[in-house]
Amino acid sequence: MVKPGRPLRSIVYPGRPEAGHGWAYLPDLAETMVQLAERDAALADFDVFHLGGHWFERGIELAEAIRRVAGDGQLPIRSFPWWAVRAASPFVTLFREMLEMRYLWREPVRLDNAKLVSLLGAEPHTPIDRALAATLAGLGCLGDNDASREVGGRRAPA
């Protein structure tokens, strides 16, 4: 997790470092939905498709990728304070709901996109560094003069 509108000082990772984790880049998800909508007539009612997105065999690799894209290999990766969420959960509905979903950060949950790929031919998939650079720039976490905004020879959108 990062704080929108602020330069990165640390990254908070809410999961077990070794548990695999998936991440979807929303523009890829949106493009997938458009492609599915264009094929609406060929789909069954209530058809289900899963987006594979980006898979990190060790979930902490997501935080490490953010650190790499930010251009600071020494950026601290901190644990999420689940103890505080648990302590406040009797009083804060959101925190109770977060605790119910915590298993998604403890256990690897990988979506199978075979059906989607079979239909579309390929899943929209922006390279991870470009997707993270655009996400961090969009959140205002990369400064305007930050050289890390240039990733893979392309400048991330502001």
Image: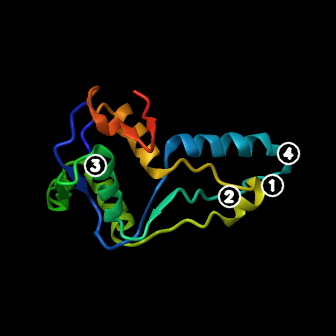
The residue type indicated by label 3 comes to Met
The residue type indicated by label 2 comes to Val
Q: Is residue 97 left or right of residue 10?
A: right
The nearer-to-camera label among 3 and 1 is 3
Question: According to the image, label 3 marks what residue?
Answer: 1
Mark 2 and mark 3: span between their CA atoms? 29 Å
Give the quarter of the image for residue 79: bottom left
Residue 48 disc label: 2
Q: Is residue 111 above or below residue 146?
A: below
The residue type indicated by label 1 comes to Ala
Q: Specify few, some or many for label 1: CA neighbours under 10 Å numbering under 14, 14-19, or 20 or more.
A: few
Question: According to the image, label 1 marks what residue?
Answer: 44
Q: At numbered mark 1, what does the secondary structure look like: helix, strand or loop?
A: loop
Colour setting: rainbow
User: Which sits earlier in the primary sequence, circle 4 or circle 3?
Assistant: 3
Question: According to the image, label 4 marks what residue?
Answer: 41
